């Protein structure tokens, strides 16, 4: 496994790798969710690259940029055990040098949900992912379904800017109680960790209602809100029943949809989602 901070060294190493190439972009603090992405890329590609970069451009004022976990030694050990071929660990100053002023902005799809709560977040995400695509030139790029809006934004950017690659979305990996794996779960105390399972319960309540025949978007949103309110440590930021491509809220769910939510458990902000399959009524 080759590890480098330098862009030119990365490109030289990338040119030496033959066959199909899969990329797994990460911010480090790797867990089994990341491992599933690397494993999928390993199965489908001849070579696999991983980026580890805590991207300052996607953090807003007062967010956890400084506190974000950075266990680089442990991360590299995990990636070597998973069979990664190439790892890029750039410094922020190399990606955003003094005078940097070029940004990728995806329009409508970034405005609701996370975009409404975290202004500028997706400008930072789209920009850094575009730079990663240019650096690694992958044939496929692997992302987790847990960040559903991020996936939608990146797919739109890939289509609109004609990146010659496939975006592969992998299922969310969960704890036994349903909590989606996230690097931010490390912030949770024991009681907060217990409470955090309410996010998945809220999504599951809405999906069960849908499976029972409910098609009104507001009824599904109400089911999520009710479950979140049952947990004293949870503070809702949003609940959504939206079109999975446009992320516009649905009055009725006739041909599938995306359930998503964000909530704070104590000081820790968590997100999650589930998809609804299209079923006529």
Image: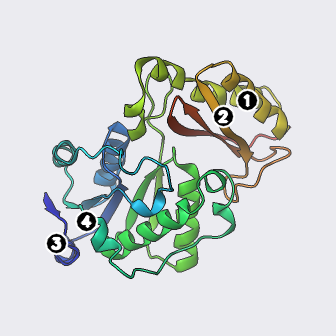
Label 4 secondary element? loop
**Of callouts 4 and 2, which one flags the residue occurring earlier in the amino acid sequence?**
4
For residue 175, side relative to residue 20 (left or right): right
Distance between the Cα atoms at labels 1 and 3? 49 Å
- For disc 3, the marked residue is 13
For residue 61, side relative to residue 256 (left or right): left
- For disc 2, the marked residue is 236
Residues under numbered marks 2 and 1 in contact, where contact means CB atoms less than 8 Å apart: yes
For residue 25, side relative to residue 180 (left or right): left
Distance between the Cα atoms at labels 2 and 1? 8 Å
Question: Visible in this render: residue 265?
Answer: yes
- For disc 1, the marked residue is 225
**Of callouts 2 and 1, which one flags the residue occurring earlier in the amino acid sequence?**
1
Label 2 secondary element? strand
For residue 172, side relative to residue 68 (left or right): right
- For disc 4, the marked residue is 90
Quadrant where the image shows the N terminus? bottom left
Q: Nearer the viewer, residue 157 or 261?
A: 261
Near mark 1 (Cα within 10 A), the count class, few <14, some 14-19 or many ≥20, is: many
């Amino acid at each position: 496994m080759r590890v480098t901070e330098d862009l030119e060294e990365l490109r030289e190493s990338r040119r030496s790798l033959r066959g199909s190439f899969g990329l797994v972009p990460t911010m480090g603090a790797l867990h089994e969710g990341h491992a599933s992405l690397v494993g999928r890329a390993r199965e489908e590609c001849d070579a696999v690259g991983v980026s580890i970069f805590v991207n300052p451009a996607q953090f807003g004022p007062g967010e956890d940029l400084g506190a974000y976990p950075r266990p680089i030694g442990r991360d590299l050990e995990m990636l070597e055990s998973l069979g990664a071929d190439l790892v890029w660990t750039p410094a922020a100053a190399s990606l955003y040098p003094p005078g940097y002023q070029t940004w990728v902005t995806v329009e409508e799809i970034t405005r609701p949900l996370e975009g409404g709560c975290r202004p500028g977040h997706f400008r930072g995400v789209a920009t850094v992912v575009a730079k990663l695509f240019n650096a690694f030139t992958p044939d496929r790029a692997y992302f987790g379904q847990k960040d559903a809006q991020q996936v939608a934004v990146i797919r739109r950017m890939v289509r609109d800017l004609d990146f010659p690659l496939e975006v592969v979305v992998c299922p969310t990996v969960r704890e036994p109680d349903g909590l989606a794996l996230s690097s931010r779960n490390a912030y949770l105390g024991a009681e907060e960790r217990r409470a955090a399972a309410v996010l998945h319960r809220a999504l599951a309540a809405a999906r069960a209602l849908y499976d029972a025949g409910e098609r009104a978007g507001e009824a599904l949103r109400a089911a999520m809100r009710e479950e979140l309110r049952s947990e004293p440590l949870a503070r809702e930021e949003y609940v959504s029943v939206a079109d999975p491509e446009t992320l516009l809220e649905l009055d009725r769910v006739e041909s599938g949809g995306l359930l998503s939510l964000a909530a704070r458990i104590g000081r820790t902000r968590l997100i999650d989602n589930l998809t609804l399959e299209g079923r006529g009524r």
